[in-house]
Image (spheres, grey):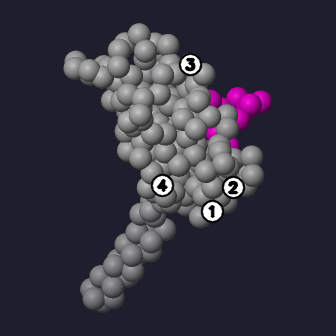
Amino acid sequence: MRMRSFALLLTLISILCATSGCEKIDNHRLPPVNVNIAFTTIGEWATYGVAGPGQSQVFIKSERLPIGYPYKESEFTGFGGVVLICDPIGAYYAYDLACPVECKANVRIEWETGTTQAGIMYCPKCGSRYDVYSYGTAISGPALEDRYGLQPYNVFVGNTTLPYAVVRR
């Protein structure tokens, strides 16, 4: 009787692990392309970065976005461009703009309008929606079904040495 109870317990634990949050999200599906955006001073960050909660900025070097940003030779903006975000509590995030479902540099996610939920970006081609305030996690569409998340990049702000802020792969 004890052996059967133990076997039943092991079976239940196995089922729980298989159906719980042990599933992996693929957020490195895009080709590995360099990302390096350096804000030399706090003034450059205030002008072109995201200086406050709820702000975002798009960086696409090939299209010279944002307009007026002084791109340096050593700067790169990923596969489809970079979106830099400051969430409502002041945390910084950066993601590649290319949709991980489509995997094309020119199929980019956009801000969703007309919704009451903040921090949602979507792909106009496949319809996938992503929560950029929650690590670029897919919340609907083919990206959720296939467990694809947005490609994240590192953001360092307020460095005591130059540059003041950096977005890197």
Residue plotted at (67% across, 38% down)? 110
Left or right, 138 with respect to 53, comes to right
Left or right, 63 with respect to 70, comes to right
| Cα gap from disc 4 to disc 3, whole angstroms | 31 Å
Q: Earlier in the sequence, mark 2 or mark 4?
A: 4
- Whether residues under marks 1 and 3 lie with C-beta atoms below 8 angstroms apart, the answer is no
Task: Identify the residue position indicated by label 1 in the image.
Answer: 145
Residue 68 - label: 3
Three-letter residue code for mark 1:
Glu
Task: Identify the residue position indicated by label 2 in the image.
Answer: 141
Q: Residue 162 at what x, y percent from top left?
A: 26, 21
Quadrant into which the C terminus falls: top left
Q: Residue 72 at what x, y percent from top left?
A: 42, 29
Q: Is residue 143 visible?
A: no
Q: Earlier in the sequence, mark 2 or mark 3?
A: 3
- Neighbor class of circle 3 (other Cα within 10 Å; few <14, some 14-19, many 20+) is few
Q: Residue 101 at what x, y percent from top left?
A: 62, 58
- Neighbor class of circle 4 (other Cα within 10 Å; few <14, some 14-19, many 20+) is some
Quadrant into which the N terminus falls: bottom left
Task: Identify the residue position indicated by label 4 in the image.
Answer: 27
- Whether residues under marks 2 and 4 lie with C-beta atoms below 8 angstroms apart, the answer is no
Residue 86 - label: none
| Cα gap from disc 2 to disc 4, whole angstroms | 15 Å
Left or right, 62 with respect to 159, comes to right
Secondary structure, magenta segment, majority class: loop
| Cα gap from disc 4 to disc 1, whole angstroms | 14 Å
Closer to viewer: mark 4 or mark 3 = 3
> In this orientation, which residue lies closer to the viewer: 73 or 30?
73
Secondary element under disc 3, as helix, strand or loop, is loop
